[in-house]
Image (tube, coloured by chain):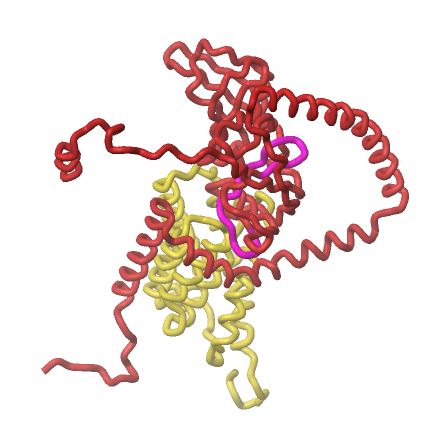
Amino acid sequence: MDYQPPPFFSRGPAPVVRLGFFVCLAVLLMVLDARFRYAESLRQVVALLAYPLQRVALAPGDLFGAAAGFFTTQVSLKRENEQLKAKQLQAANELLTVGALRSENAQLRRLLEARERLPRESTLAEILYQGRDPFSRKVIIDKGRQQGIQPGQPVIDDLGVVGQVTRVYPLLSEVTLITDKEQRTPVQVVRNGLRAIIYGGGDRGTLELTYIATNADVLADDVLVTSGIDGIYPPGLPVAKVSRIEQDAAYSFAKITCMPTAGTDQNRQVLVLSREMNLPAAPVETESVAGKPPKQKRSRSRE
Amino acid sequence: MSFYEQPQRILLPAKVGYMALTLVLALVFNLLPWRGVTGLPDMVALVLTFWCVHQPRRMGIGIAWFLGLVMDAGNGALLGQHAFAYAFLAFAAVSLHRRILWFSPWRQAAHVLVLLLASQMLMLAVRLVAGGVFPGLTYFAGAFIAAALWPAASFVLLLPQRRAESVDENRPI
């Protein structure tokens, strides 16, 4: 009864069926990736496939850089050397002061029985390229799990905080810049110690200080540094400078726009700091703290 | 005036290796370190559309989906975003391949522009739902540039099929 075409005419399922199958698969992946972060292992495998292609794509730029370095004239090298020497002399003076201050600080901290802050280990990394994804602000650096990079490590340059490592591949890592819309950094105003959380401004390369009351003491040109209460960023690293404050009586919060201190878009070399590991253990939640009989709890969970 | 605007050439069969090579080259182009340049043409989408139109039996939705996955992982985008858009692109190109090939290269480019724009719209919608930022209108410039490259791309990508393996005066190709 039912007619079957000869096998050499058969072309598999209809295009619409195939489209439906692959679209479902894609949507499933997107939900897993965006909401639950379950797709990381698949991403690692596919990224490993793309890695040789990325290396090939980076080769012309590397070659150009090498050639440009070869043809740098001696004069410019000599001038740079002199400048660096002068700078080092200046820095040496400050370094001596810093040494004295550090020992004094250590002593004071011991006096206060504060936990001694351990010097952090850091890894020098180079920014390979900016992510092509136009919806987020991320860069790829040339150090990965093989070099001991872990997700969550802060990334700084010579001027301030650049961002945070969000994904680690075997040989590369992805750094989300502080200007990304999804990135938050805990900060403190240097002038008066006011704590706040700074949000990335997204596309414009700016930052926004949100949920600050209209009457709070924040002025233009205030310097914001990391507060360090999250245990991820070391305290005192410059993050941003307040550039504009808009106070609207219609809203209870002021709109404060800041510019990042670090060259989030210019630098090539960055420093990846290790995470501080001497955190106190997270408090254990006990039944009595919840203060609710288990019977009531069960009925709520069923709803 | 007939719709059959140009004489059709008899072509040699396409080689799978050459198709794979062009797709890999397009991937390398897309993974080049563009430092914050927006509005770049998506070469993978262009080459994919080309092979879907010209070789719909060899190129299809599955391959497009996998290429999209590689793009997502290589660029750190939302996993599945390009896969989703490319699957739709391949489906549309395969369904329209009989129609598109009737037209002259520039009119084909107009068809391709619509397909590329639609796939970019899909990606934009997905990312806005997932909480991304609107990247500005330059984001769509890539589709226009890619469509403008279509006539040149179809000439280059068909070159190996136009070349006869042994030249013979009495043979039409």
Q: Colour of chain A?
A: red
At a point 35% along the width and 54% down the height, the residue shown is: A29
**Residue A255, image x, y percentages:** 46, 19
Picture quarter containing residue B37?
top right
Picture quarter containing residue A56?
bottom right
Which image quadrant: the N terminus of chain B?
Answer: bottom left
The answer to whether residue A258 is magenta is no
The reply to whether residue B1 is visible in this rendering is no
Q: Which chain is yellow?
A: B
At a point 69% along the width and 55% down the height, the residue shown is: A62
Query: Which region of the structure is painted magenta?
Result: A155-172
The correct choice, above or below, for B149 with respect to A297 in the image is below
Q: Nearer the viewer, residue B4 or B84?
A: B84
Q: Nearer the viewer, residue A272 or A103?
A: A103
Give the left or right position of residue A206, taking residue A101 as reference. Answer: left
Give the left or right position of residue B41, taking residue A156 as reference. Answer: left
Q: Nearer the viewer, residue B45 or A295?
A: A295
At a point 61% along the width and 59% down the height, the residue shown is: A55
Q: Residue furthest left?
A: A1
The correct choice, above or below, for A33 with respect to A285 in the image is below
**Residue A91, image x, y percentages:** 79, 29
The answer to whether residue A160 is magenta is yes
At a point 62% along the width and 46% down the height, the residue shown is: A127
**Residue B151, image x, y percentages:** 51, 61
Q: Nearer the viewer, residue A151 or B137?
A: A151
The reply to whether residue B117 is visible in this rendering is yes
**Tally of numbered discs:** 0
Picture quarter containing residue B126?
top left
**Residue A253, image x, y percentages:** 41, 16
